[in-house]
Amino acid sequence: MRIWVTATAVLFGLGIALPALAEREEESHEKQQDQRRKLKDNERREVEQVQRRQQEDRARQDRERADRDRMDRERADRGRMDRERADRDRMDRERLEHERLDRERLDRERMDRERVDRDRMDRERAARDREAAERGREIRAQEVHREAREEAWRLRMAPPAPRTEMRPVAPSPRHVWIRGYWGWQDGRHVWMGGRWEEPPAPGRVWVDARWVNENGEWVFQRGYWEPAAAPPPPAPVAVYADPVVSEVNIALGPPPPRRVELVPRRPGHGYLWIEGDWIWDGREYRWAPGRWEAPRAGWVWVPPRWQPVGNQMQWRPGHWARR
């Protein structure tokens, strides 16, 4: 009986203790599993951190390698651009040097041509001067012979009016027109035609031959060369306004024929002879004698003009016009 009770008590105790032991073992097992999970999580996080650091290191290395490659490319580009710029500068210097040499060669050639032209012109001018001197000597000899005959012309018969002559083309710009005059041959007046003549020296002007009445006798005074008068002082620069030119219609016939005028001596270099002409003063035709006028820089003289317009005559006065 006692054994049974003991066994029963043991069994009862085991029945109570076993579940508790099982619970503790289960709790211990769960704790171990939690610890293993935590360890695994820690290991996983450590592995992830290591992998992340490795990825960041690889990314940083890739960026650094890309930056080094970019810098190498930029350095290579700068070197190439510097070489190209140096090549362009060298080519520009060579081009400028070639252009300078070409300009110097062209200048030398131009100077050589100008020297040759000057020499040729000097030779031609010397030849013309020699020819002119020979012609002058011939003309002078003729003049001396003619002057010997003309000095004795002293008459009681007045000479006719001077003729209007057509001037031929001048041989050169240096020649001066010698007007014709009435001479005396074989007991009558004979017209001596005008001619072009070169002055014997620079700065000489020709004084025309003329007949002078002295106490009822007509005495011939031959023409001669004399030194030119000193030119007048330069005139102040003038400002000319554009003229207002108005045309006038006249209900009369045409004006009388134009008169033949004796042109006086030129007052100075460059003066322009304005020929005389008939003008309309509002009531009748009136003769306006010719005159010398000072030149105007940049202007040109437009002569007066008469022209028929229907049954009337239209007059446009002479005026200065801009070139």
Image: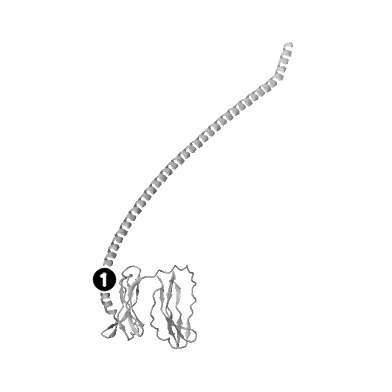
Say which quarter of the image contains residue 185.
Answer: bottom left
Vertical placement of 75 versus 152: above or below?
Answer: above
Q: Quadrant of the N terminus?
A: top right
Find disc 1 in the rendering and name its residue.
137
Vertical placement of 160 versus 39: above or below?
Answer: below
Q: Quadrant of the C terminus?
A: bottom left
Vertical placement of 285 versus 34: above or below?
Answer: below
Residue nearer the viewer, 196 or 300: 196
Percent across and percent down for residue 150 are: 29, 79
Percent across and percent down for residue 131 are: 26, 68
Q: Identify the residue shown where x is 32% and y is 59%.
A: 114
Q: Identify the residue shown where x is 33% and y is 81%.
A: 219
* Extreme-front residue of the structure: 215
- Note whether residue 323 is visible: no
Residue nearer the viewer, 284 or 51: 284
Amino acid type, residue under disc 1 in the picture: Arg
Numbered label tally? 1
Q: Identify the residue shown where x is 68% and y is 22%.
A: 24
In the shown orientation, is residue 282 left or right of residue 2?
Answer: left
Percent across and percent down for residue 132 are: 28, 69
In the shown orientation, is residue 189 left or right of residue 302?
Answer: left
